[in-house]
Amino acid sequence: MERYKLIKEVGDGTFGTVWRAINRHNGEVVAIKKMKKKYYTWEECVNLREVKSLRRMNHPNIVKLKEVIRENDILFFIFEYMECNLYQLMKDREKLFSEAEIRNWCFQVFQALVYMHQRGYFHRDLKPENLLVTKAVIKVADFGLAREINSQPPYTEYVSTRWYRAPEVLLQSSLYGSKVDMWAMGAIMAELFSLRPLFPGSSEADEIHKICGVIGTPTVDTWAEGLKLAGSINYQFPRFPGVHLSSLIPSASDDAIKLITSLCMWDPRKRPTAAEALQHPFFQSCFYVPPSLRSKSSITRTPPSAAMKSSVEQQCARRYSSTLPSSKLIPNCATVKLHASLSPGVQRKLDLVNQDENKDSKTLKSADRQPKYRPPARKSPTSTLRGRAGAGAGANSELADKFGSMNMGARKQTIGPGSTKAPPMKTGGQWNGGNSDMFLRSAAKLQSGKSMTRKVAG
């Protein structure tokens, strides 16, 4: 830990505290999570759910675990630093977010959930505090409660902050899956539109009461399994007809209301998957397919206007200019030397490189083996044709004079000693190769996030 200088505490949770720190060697700002529990063996550390899950994930919308350090029986997680979380953006905010902002954030989170669920994990603790934001980029964090989808039940009944907890978990079901993340996303989306929680229950019973008041009491048709769960714990649902979400979220569009309604269904089997949510009309403007790549069936459709096309392209450029995964490869020899220089009692797990990066390096090597372009030889068919063309130059001199007198303006380009070159690139831009960016942008300074706490019962 001597390589890091702690700057400010930015969070305090049940299992640990989070600090903003700086790497003394390269000046990189990072977030350090110091666990409150002591760990006496390295095996105990690497078997933690948060470590096991994050080591298997490499996605631009999932927070990156850079390093794990165990020093004097204290465990430290070194994460990439994000400016703030979604709750801090909503807290004490008076002006509502635009639907474009909400669409951008939710689109990224659903992409992370698709990646996570396809790899056999579900988060179980999605809430605004665990969604970290830097400008237009949002990332899922805090995998301390993440579980494998194929792991054996029963699961623990308490898994998330009560306001975003799925009804099957509230009714103490031991059989639940990735659809609990979809319910949480529905509640988070509604809160982003209204800046107020959709189901602010003060206890488990009050939470179910709040849910019934919004989406109505479940029936045999809407959720027969839920009635059995309630009967097993001698619980009786309160009788409410429910209300239309547009009356609670007047600023949301019809597509947004429909998506939130589908996410907050009583029956988890009726909720969409993360991949299905991305295909919802609410996210239609997030996809733009160039005309050359469209299928024949879509050619007859009316193309988007030039203004819409340019705005979508600009949004995509801003959105993904800093979200591409890092492609920097670190040689294993550097890690071995660093392990050898560590003092006793200190163990490090450095550079958790994903297997996807190895695949990228293989692709680059195979590209190097492709045959390079060679100019034609003197006796090649191309040179022969050039010679024949030279023989008829006299007959076509008049036509050549006409072409030679044509003025191409600013785009005229010649080959030879007098060729013009493009002006050199001006300074003031930064090539961010560490994040595999394909864009030049000005260097942005990170702002320190404010330390805020959220008191939630349960």
Image: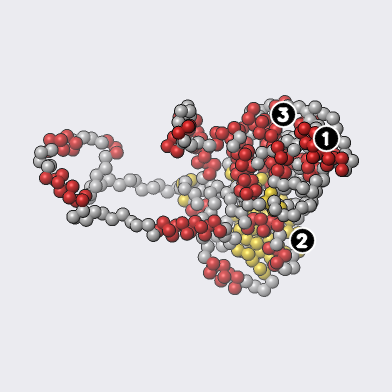
Dot 1 amino acid type: His
**Percent coordinates x, y for residue 83 in the rendering:** 63, 47
Disc on the earlier residue, 1 or 2: 2
Dot 3 amino acid type: Leu
Q: Is residue 104 left or right of residue 363?
A: right
User: Label 1 vs label 3: CA separation?
Assistant: 16 Å
Give the residue pinned by disc 3. Answer: 245
What residue is at 51 percent from the left and 55 percent from the top? 327
Nearest the camera: 315 or 13?
315
Colour scheme employed for the rendering of this structure: secondary structure
**Percent coordinates x, y for residue 63 in the rendering:** 62, 51
User: Label 1 vs label 2: CA separation?
Assistant: 36 Å
Give the residue pinned by disc 1. Answer: 209
Nearest the camera: 202 or 260?
260
Residue 196 higher or lower than 356, as above or below: above
Give the residue pinned by disc 2. Answer: 37
Which mark lies nearer to you, 3 or 2?
Answer: 3
